[in-house]
Image (tube, rainbow, N blue to C red):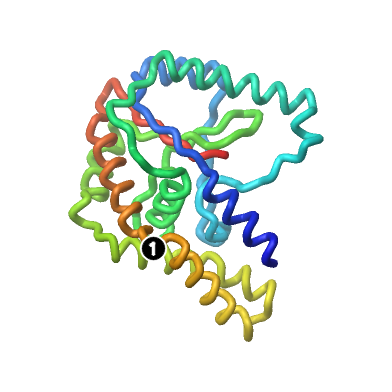
Amino acid sequence: MIINEVLLRSLKMSLKATYFLLQKDKFEEFCKKKHLVPGRSPTIEEDDGKGPGEIRVVTQREMKSAAFRKKVAENQKVWTYFEEFMEVPFKLKLSGAVISDLVYCLRTMTSIDLTEHSLVPEGGGFDWWVIDEKQKAKLLKQLKPSKFSEDGLRDMYFESMQRGLSKQFEKSFGKKSAKEILASYLQRLDEDFPERGEAMLDAVKGLYKYVERVDENTVFMLTVYH
């Protein structure tokens, strides 16, 4: 349990976030080249408290395989394409873990779903979350920073974690012990990152600024990955 927990938390903190604006014609061209298809957000019942994106360890044997090298090469082409056409008007000093937690909390605890327009490669890979003009007006109302607070976001995070992990802990430790063990685990998470509420509020403010720049010719793209 301790080894798995440390590994999971280490992997979570290694998450990276990529975000940028892209002209709509370039976005549509990219979707065709990469054969991107509509993805599907997991239902609340399928979520397990980890947040968006599957956390998986790639073995050394897999890394040496031709299939893995091919996937790396394809991903490199993705970044090359984006570097040529993407616009990053300002950088957000945020970890992928914070973005992941915020997206997960908003989707499971409120009506705000940044993953509503999700695209995935046909052959598999991480999701791209796309915000276009159709979503802009709604998200600007929902994501208005003045509607959030550091304490409120922190409380939302821990409530979402408790909901997402309670069944998993009951299955692992039994209903009698799960509540106490989960409470101890959440306390350690709080002690490890006391600035969580502040970081999540900064993420709300940053995402809001990007959504503001979306128009009929521009989309906002966001993804979280290892």
Location of residue 217 in the rendering, given as x and y in whole percent from the top left corner: 28, 20
Q: Quadrant of residue 23?
A: top left
**In what element is the residue under mark 1?**
loop
Location of residue 24 in the rendering, given as x and y in whole percent from the top left corner: 35, 20
Say left or right for 64 vs 121.
Answer: right
Q: Is residue 24 above or below residue 125?
A: above
**Location of mark 1 (residue):** 194
For label 1, the crowd category at 10 Å Cα-Cα, with few meaning under 14, some 14 to 19 and many 20 or more, is few
Say left or right for 72 vs 197.
Answer: right
Q: Is residue 122 above or below residue 225?
A: above
Q: Is residue 45 above or below residue 42?
A: below
Compare residues 39 and 161 and report the one nearer the observer.
161
Identify which amino acid the numbered label 1 is placed on.
Pro
Location of residue 101 in the rendering, given as x and y in whole percent from the top left corner: 44, 53
Residue at 42 percent across and 50 percent down: it is 98
- The quadrant the C terminus occupies is top right
Residue at 56 percent across and 36 percent down: it is 126
Compare residues 90 and 165 and report the one nearer the observer.
90
- The quadrant the N terminus occupies is bottom right
Residue at 53 percent across and 75 percent down: it is 184
